[in-house]
Amino acid sequence: MRLAHQELNMRGMTFVDVIVGVAIMLIVFLGIFGAFQVAIELVLTTKAKAGGVALVTEQLEYVRGLPYDSVGTVGGIPSGPIEQLSQETINGILYTVRTLVLYTDAPEDGLGEADSTGVTADYKTIKVEALWSIRGVSRSTSALTRIAPNGVESLAAGGTLRVNVFDALQQPVSGAAVRIENPGVSPAVDLTVYADSQGSIILPGAPVASGYKITVTKDGYSTAKTYDTTVQNPNPNPAHVAVVDAKTTTISFSIDRTGSLRIETYEPAGPGTFEDSFTTDAKLSETTAAQVSGGALKLFEDSFGYSSTGEARSVGVSPAYLSQWSTVTFSVVVPLETSALVRVYSLVDGVSVPIPDEDLPGNSAGFTVSPISLAGVLPSAYPSLQLVAELATEDASSTPQVLEWAMSYVAGPTPLPDVSVSLRGTKTIGTTNGGVPIYKVEQDLETNNNGVVSVTPLEWDTYTVRVPGSQYAVFEQCADPLSIEPAAEETVQLMLVNQDAHSLRVTVLGNAAPVAEAAVVLTGTGGGSGTTSACGQSYFGGLSSGTYSLAISAPGFQNSVQDVSVAGPTVVTVILSP
């Protein structure tokens, strides 16, 4: 037995040794495999870069072999036989070779129009860049050289084109892509240059001509450009620019990070009611020894008389977009020796739970007097309610009766789908011959089934959102107009009602901010009174065309009384003095 036990121990130890050995070998081989992978990656990267360096060197040697006057790119400034972009495959790797040739103004003899020799095209700067991708990772290598003319610099025909690129705060935007096109010169110009750290590009030696089209872009930024003269835009601004001989033409553009705007259309919050007059039992979910009979809820009756106790529960009341519970009202007939109590329950996953007294005082004892205030019953905690009636009698020939009950609430705002809206910015790109502005952003949109439409990308600007047509009137619209900052994501909500022939929307401001809960009284045919919303607005519909007296008062401000002319949908802004 002892020998067998030793053999078993030896076998167990041998098995553990095997597991440990395999684990060690696995760790070693995984390390070797990882190092092998790194080595392969390094070899591929080095080999690919060597190919890129070879292409850059080859392109530079080709450029150096050209006469000075021929050094230029197809469509570039200066122009020449060199392709701006070319592609070549080496060892299965696709390379893109990008060549840029620019005139350079040497600072030694002055820059621009301050150049003492009058020649701003002192020499040419050539940049050659090779770009490729290894396993989805983009890589590049580049080289820069300069070529000077033989002998003394000479006056080159042409002018200088300078483009400045700024952001919304007038700070330079480096790396912005500036595309310059002019098919009207020979050879045609089509060149893309990237702004320097000062947000500028300077192109000496540009051919003298009009019609230079300039487009400025950058990833994630808005686009700015010059515009064609067309029938739709006869007076573009900015128009395409002209280059004048021996002069510098300067044009500036503003671009910045784009944002987005979400437009939501709603019906405003309004009252709703669940009510049951007990003509049928369709609005009851459950009864115990109770029945609907003769237009009332009563105790169950058989040949022995009425049951001594009974109960009935309404269906659950779960309004969509509930914003406030209001009141419960009921009407009962309680003969002598009978009683009727009403309680309010919360429905949670189909289970009825009485609302505790801390949220609805007196609910545990039951209510015998109408109405019941639900001011403390918050929709966030109690989104679904149920009415429960408890009936009792001590006289089998007599029954209490519930003639009707109702539960009121406020629901909304409710999404309003398929609404046409228009969006317009303040930036313009020209005017008509009649002087009417042509806006850079002017779009007709429509909200989806959820009452939402999103506009992205959208550049920084001040925008107005309107609801065209005669179907809807704006009941409330905060932030009108709406300012969108660079990279901002904004939302505007439009509360809409069916449009009347004549209506008035009043916005009350004080200390440059909306005044909430200001008392607004409109005197005239169909007028009325109300208080302003959190946006400082109040709406009056169903008015007649004519002149009304508008009186506004708010704590901390002087009262305002003024006449208002109402004709169609009318909007008035009143500024209160402190």
Image: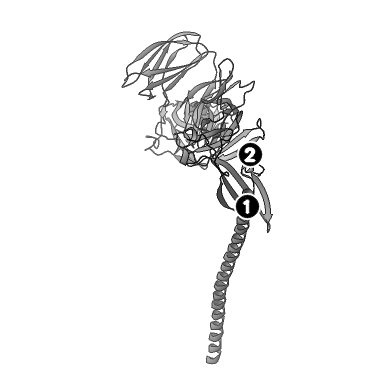
Q: CA distance from mark 2 to mark 1?
A: 18 Å
Q: Amino acid at mark 1?
A: Glu
Q: Residue at x 55, y 72 (%)?
A: 27
Eyeballing the image, is 432 above or below 135? above
Classify 10 Å Cα crowding around label 2: few (below 14), some (14-19), many (20 and above): many
Q: Nearer the viewer, residue 388 or 436?
A: 436
Report x, y in % for residue 531.
40, 21
Quadrant housing the C terminus: top left
> Which disc, if any, is residue 74?
none
* Residue underneath mark 2: 79
Image position, residue 469 (x, y; %): 59, 19
Residue occupied by mark 1: 61
Looking at the image, residue 126 sits to the left or right of residue 172; the answer is right
Q: Which amino acid type is marked by label 2?
A: Ser
Residue 49 visible (yes or no): yes
N-terminal-most mark, 2 or 1: 1
Looking at the image, which is closer to me, 94 or 316? 94
Quadrant location of the N terminus in the rendered image: bottom right
Please, what secondary structure does the residue beneath circle 2 have? loop
Residue 511 placement (x, y as % from top left): 35, 23
Foreground of the two, 467 or 489: 489
Q: Residue sitting at 55 percent across and 13 percent down?
A: 501
